[in-house]
Amino acid sequence: MPNQPVEISVVVPALNEAVNLPHLVRRIDGALSGRSYEILIVDDASRDDTVPVCAALAKQYPVQLHVRERPTAGLSGAVLHGMERATGEFIAVMDADLQHPPEKLPELIRALISDECDFALGSRYVAGGSTGSGWTLFRRLNSWVATVLARPFTGRVSDPMSGFFALRRSTYEGAQRLTPLGYKIGLELICKCRVKQVKEIPIHFAERTAGESKLSMKQQFKYLEHLSRLYDFCFPRISPMLKFALVTGASWLVGFAIFTMMMTTRPQAAVAPVSVAYLGAIAVTMIFHTRYVRTQREFLVRKHPWTDFLFSSLAEWSACSLAAVYIGSRVLHPYPLELFMIPFSVAMAVRYILRKEFLLDIRGLRSDVRMQEMQ
């Protein structure tokens, strides 16, 4: 049916999955028999025989191979690369490792055609869904924690981590500023496409039979960074406030520990314990700032975030030290708690003003970007 418009585009990200691709393509063809479809295999510069295998498959099936010579954004970037090139009315995404059952593709598409939802998701955790026997307790717990962390913007969806899903191409084209990180592209699309209704289709998530798993501890940390971006997107006011409170609380705890130790050894000192303690607080803030710059650099208006950070930190430390000097000169025997709290509060006020109004914008993303998203 070469002249028919493509109804279904199946996007398959692949990295060193040559051994699995022939089995996967045959099963997709069997599941979509009689329908117009295309399979877009997005290869992230695999070192195996993916290219010749796909060339052979293309002679018999509607397979297209798209090789990303310089892949970025991992699996999520590969999926978006394929979705941008998809021509079907419906786009389905699944892994190449045979853990997602292609036989469920018609059911996913049927849910979209019947207008039951605008996002159909293959789920391991709804009634009728299951996982392979090799899933350990730790892996199940890890999946549960990841799901709970995503619940504020996915609602009652039981398996938002699933990488097996389908949506209309029009839904995808309505996405706002896709910036995925790591493996959870489905979660990104649910948020950024403003999905209103998700229908979960039960699937059996099989054990990998060949190749190597791509899941690693690095991907786990990327997921947390990805969640941070999505919290900023979905809760542009509350999320930055909570993050600011988190950073402030962590830095104050470290600062207070340093202050207490110094006051124990030098009970008559006033300025030195406060000044040194605030340097410790700055060190903690620097750790969070490193993550912030790495994940949000493309949205920062100012080009030198570390220069801004150093300027802000110097201003905060100066304000804290001057407040300690003032208290030491005006109060004969200040209570240790007020000697700590007042200078640190002054410094935090300086931090908030500088970073919100002049430098880094603690809301995470600039207001002009927010306005574009709301239009």
Image (spheres, rainbow, N blue to C red):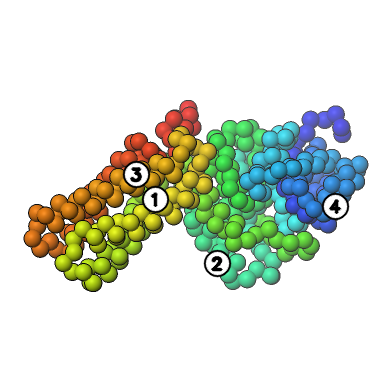
CA–CA distance in space, label 2 to label 4 = 35 Å
Residue 236: horizontal and vertical position, in percent? 42, 41
CA–CA distance in space, label 3 to label 2 = 41 Å
Q: Are marks 3 and 2 in contact (CB under 8 Å)?
A: no
Q: Earlier in the sequence, mark 2 or mark 4?
A: 4
Residue sitting nearer the eye, 63 or 88: 63
Q: Residues within 10 Å of mark 4 (few under 14, many from 20)?
A: few
Q: Which residue is mark 3?
A: 312
Q: Which residue is mark 4?
A: 49
Q: Earlier in the sequence, mark 1 or mark 4?
A: 4
In the visual, does 232 lie left or right of 313? right
Residue 103 seen:
no
Q: Earlier in the sequence, mark 2 or mark 1?
A: 2
Circle 2 — which element? helix
CA–CA distance in space, label 1 to label 4 = 46 Å
Residue 189: horizontal and vertical position, in percent? 58, 42
Residue at 29% in and 59% down: 276
Q: Amino acid at mark 3?
A: Ser
Circle 1 — which element? helix
> Residue 243: which disc?
1
Circle 3 — which element? helix
* Closer to viewer: mark 3 or mark 1: 3
